[in-house]
Amino acid sequence: MSVSCGVECVVILGCMRWAWKRCTYIGSDDSATWPSATADEFEPVPRICRLILAVYEPDLRNPQFPPPGGYRLNPDCLIKRVTYEQTQGLSPPYIIYVDHEHRQIVLAIRGLNLAKESDYKLLLDNRLGMQMFDGGYVHHGLLKSAIWLLNQESETLGRLWIENGSDYKMIFAGHSLGSGVAALLTIIVVNHRERLGDLPRSKIQCYAIAPARCMSLNLAVKYADVIHSIVLQDDFLPRTATPLEDIFKSIFCLPCLLFLVCLRDTFIPEGRKLRDPRRLYAPGRMYHIVERKFCRCGRYPPEVRTAIPVDGRFEQIVLSCNATADHGILWIEREAEKALERMKESCPETVTTAPKVQKLERLETIEKEHKDALERAVTLNVPHAVTPNEESPEHQNKEASPSQEEHTPEMKAKSSQGKANWDELVEKLFKKKESGDLQLRDDNAPQ
């Protein structure tokens, strides 16, 4: 009797300890050891958020839902607006905007529309380990959408880049569902830069706002130099390893799902998670906006932390009443703007070196952090992880040059783990109608 009582006490104490740790775990714990971001690297984020919000507006000259301070965009620079009717459900709506002030060409993609069946079809078109691409695993439906979008707009984007002196940056941005499409679109463009007039890799950037888990860990780290993910405090989506299709099947009972996922993931060792090549993660370098503290009411002045984590990459669900609210693009834009203003205000007090020197030093630090992350991924035996030498810009340039595409049989044999052939990629996922338009294949066999 005494033995059974002792066992019960141990079990109860263990459950209480687990419950205490889970309930006291807050979003800021994920980035507690990360360094702070600088104003220069974070400066585009609020502007990109406003561009994504502009996708929701039918007329920028007469906006219906402007954010605080307005969109601060020039309607004359809006090149193209594509709606659900035009995409026919193959992609979320998007806009193409030329920002002459900042010398950028931006393709911004909206997030999930709960009222649109086509968005659910896009999410549900996936199974764990269904789609392999570029030596890793990606979300099948989002990859299809990214390929379709590039096939539709590559000519427009390439023309705009050439017309503006082949000097503007090419920015792909999206929120929630759109962030996954934008991130995979960026990977495709990096590997097929000839589609946009041989655009240099250094001119390509992606901003994934409230990012979806859309690619395996090796790809998330590999492309951290071009993909930037922005997470607001307790946002549930970057932390939920449950496939997107299961999350949005349970959207109306999301708190129950998050609790069950939290309970399940507690008993899965970190090493086992890292060794699963099919497990999807939020892409690229992470920027974490932190604005709340444990057992404190209200919001504090936001701070932004950044890193390229390999292990501990937003793996813990936060049991918070703000887990869904922090996913909203309006809140993210507002807090990102506050954080940027705060960083700019603190700069004159702390900067003692010349701005140009400081910027160069930060660029060197960012490059070193990327190399360190690649090395750590290899050290932790992350499946299909590449070394810094394999991922150097020089290697990428050689890989993308036309003369290198017709290589030896050994190189062709590695195409499944390296750069995929564009025509083969399109042929696998789409079929051409008599009119020449692309149509999704009906089969869902693994590619």
Image: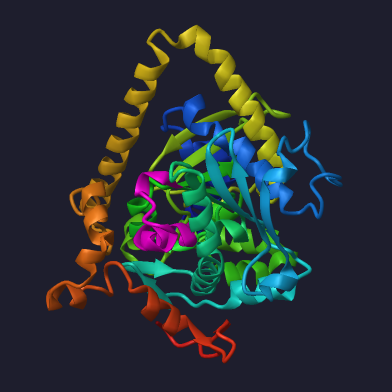
In the depicted view, which residue is nearer to us: 90 or 256? 90
Number of numbered callouts drawn: 0
Q: Name the residue: 62% across, 66% down.
A: 247
Main secondary structure of the magenta stretch = helix
Residue 192, magenta (yes or no): yes
Identify the image's colour scheme: rainbow, by chain, secondary structure or one colour: rainbow
In the depicted view, which residue is nearer to us: 436 or 57? 436
* Picture layout, residue 31 above or below residue 277: above
Q: Name the residue: 49% across, 74% down.
A: 140
Residue 150: percent from left, percent from top? 51, 66
Q: Name the residue: 30% across, 67% down.
A: 419
Residue 433, magenta (yes or no): no
Residue 76: percent from left, percent from top? 72, 44
- Residue extent of the magenta highlight: 183-204
Residue 322 visible in the current orientation: no
| Quarter occupied by residue 368 | top left
Q: Name the residue: 27% across, 70% down.
A: 417
Residue 160: percent from left, percent from top? 53, 52
Residue 402 visible in the current orientation: yes
* Picture layout, residue 21 above or below residue 81: above
* Picture layout, residue 446 above or below residue 165: below
Residue 114: percent from left, percent from top? 75, 66
From the viewer's perspective, is 135 left or right of 318? left
Quadrant location, the C terminus: bottom left
